Image: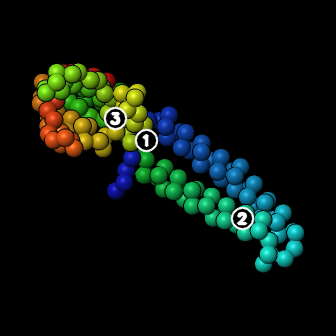
Amino acid sequence: MEDVKYYTQEDLDALKAELNNLESVERPRISQAIADARDKGDLSENAEYDAAKEAQGLLELKIAKLRNLIAKARVLDESKIDISKVLIYSIVKIKNLANKMEMTYTIVPESESDLKGGKISVSSPIAKALIGNKKGDVVSVQAPAGVMEFEILDVSR
């Protein structure tokens, strides 16, 4: 199955809660707005009706996308992560071999990435280079300024 995304249980529960809110709160609210606008008479010149119908279309699109995302979601059991090599949810301490600067990152799904918080997306160039490697390995990352080399100093969970 393509486009599988990995989430913690907490993140998946949040997506399900958002879907539930859209279906049980927002959908009836928009249906009521359409009914109210319809009661005002001529639909051919009823801007409220047109706006409510457009909002309904957008809501249904959002619901469909969220359902699809949840259907393809996989929960990652953080307790079963192998710490002998870099994988998703690994905490990786690396050293830039050019300037000797050390950095620590947590490899996370795209939806959780936060560079300021030290969380990099599993699809980022650095994470892609690190995945599957272990402590002591040197990896090369293609960056706009050229190839950068990093040594993996530590891998933890």
The front one of 39 and 85 is: 39
Q: Residues within 10 Å of mark 1 (few under 14, many from 20)?
A: few
Report the Cα–Cα distance between label 1 and label 2. 31 Å
Q: Is residue 8 visible?
A: yes
Q: Position of residue 93 (x, y in %)?
A: 24, 23
Would you name the residue on which mark 3 appears? 120
Image quarter hosting the C terminus: top left
Callout 2: SS: helix
Q: Residues within 10 Å of mark 2 (few under 14, many from 20)?
A: some
Assess whether mark 1 and mark 3 are in contact (beta carbons under 8 angstroms).
no
Q: Position of residue 60 (x, y in %)?
A: 61, 61
Of the numbered discs in the image, which one, if any, rests on residue 111? 1
Q: Residue furthest right?
A: 40
- Which one is earlier in the sequence, the residue at label 1 or at label 2? 2
Callout 1: SS: helix
What residue type is disc 2 on? Answer: Ala
Of the numbered discs in the image, which one, if any, rests on residue 21? none
Q: Position of residue 69 (x, y in %)?
A: 47, 52
Left or right, 147 with reference to 56: left
Left or right, 156 with reference to 96: right
Residue sitting at x 21%, y 25%: 94
Q: Position of residue 106 (x, y in %)?
A: 33, 29
Give the label, 1 or 2, closer to the camera.
Answer: 2
The front one of 2 and 39 is: 39
Callout 3: SS: strand
Q: Compared with residue 111, is residue 95 higher up or lower down, i.e. above or below?
A: above
Would you name the residue on which mark 2 appears? 51
Q: Quadrant of residue 122?
A: top left
